[in-house]
Amino acid sequence: MRYGEGRTSLTAVSAGFLSFPTGSLTTANSAEATLSERRWIADLALGRDIIGNGADAMQLKFGVRTAEFRAMTSALNNQSITFRFNTPQTTNGITYSSFTQGFTTSAPQESTFLGTGPRVGVDGSVRFAGSWAFDYLGDIAVLFGTQKFQRTTNASQSLTPAGIGTVPAPTTTFDSSSKFATVFNPDIQVGVSYWMTQAVKVSLSYRLDAYFNVITALDNQNDPTKLQRIDRYVHGPRAAVTVQF
């Protein structure tokens, strides 16, 4: 069984200014987004030596893999527009020389996949230079499961000074999708090992796990009825100690 998670964030800020004969207009916009992903894989397999035997054998494995991939995004956008007048204005009995209209939108969303399917693979080791060995591993699984997507959008407005106009009530919309999906999940690992004894070895390797079309997400059109499917590649170094009985 393997587990992993990752996190990233993004912040963007912009501003604008426009002058006209009776005053000026200033805009400000800030956006924040945080993405976190979690994944786990569980394998149950049987193996058979097909070339060689013992610690150096090439083994064919076949069995069942279950995996879950979960991506969560939290997005917040704040926008303000400020009008300034050269001559004070009066509305609803309130005198002001400027007013600011604010817009706030938050849109947390979550994409998930949970599936199970057959898995087949090979792994083995080739000795060289005495106690050193080249290790290799390759699997491919076909996972059948459900992809889910959901997003909640909260929008609100404000007006300063209050009372000079009507502010719409806050709104909340909910979008969701659930569909059957097939995900191809190959992985490969290569590295070197050093046998400290006949039963204990230390290894350093590099592993790549690929998930094709594993989750759904919004595209540039931001349309929840036209979701795109996203691939994920997880890779990095791996250190291990193996004890054989």
Image (tube, grey):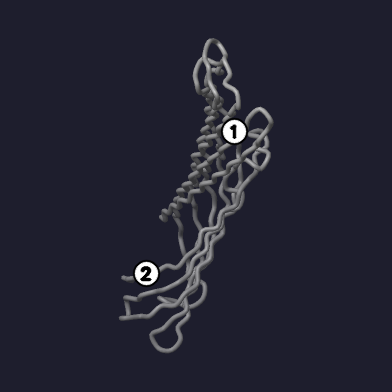
Label 2 or label 1, whichever comes before in sequence order? 1
Residue type highlighted by circle 1: Ser
State how many labels appear. Answer: 2
Name the residue rendered at 55%, 34% in the picture. Answer: 79
| Residue found at x 38% / y 80% | 194
The residue closer to the viewer here, 163 or 183, is 163
For mark 2, what is the residue? 240
Numbered disc in front, either 2 or 1: 1
Measured as percent of width and height from the top left, residue 232 is found at 56, 54
Q: Gap in Å between the C-alphas at discs 2 and 1? A: 40 Å
Q: Quadrant of the C terminus?
A: bottom left
Q: In the rendered view, would you say 158 is above or below 128?
A: above
Left or right: where 231 falls relative to 245? right
Q: Residue 118 location in percent, x, y?
A: 54, 52
What's the residue at 55%, 16% (across, down)? Answer: 164
Residue drawn where x is 48% and y is 80% of the image: 126
Q: Residue furthest front?
A: 87
Residue under pointer 1? 177
Q: Residues within 10 Å of mark 1 (few under 14, many from 20)?
A: some
Q: Secondary structure at mark 1?
A: strand
What is the three-letter code of the residue carrying label 2? Ala
How packed mark 2 is, by other alpha carbons closer than 10 Å (few <14, some 14-19, many 20 or more), is: few
Residue 139 got which mark? none
Left or right of 118 on screen, residue 130: left
Numbered disc 2: secondary structure: strand
> Which quadrant of the rendered structure holds the N terminus?
bottom left
Does the CB distance between marks 2 and 1 fall below 8 Å? no
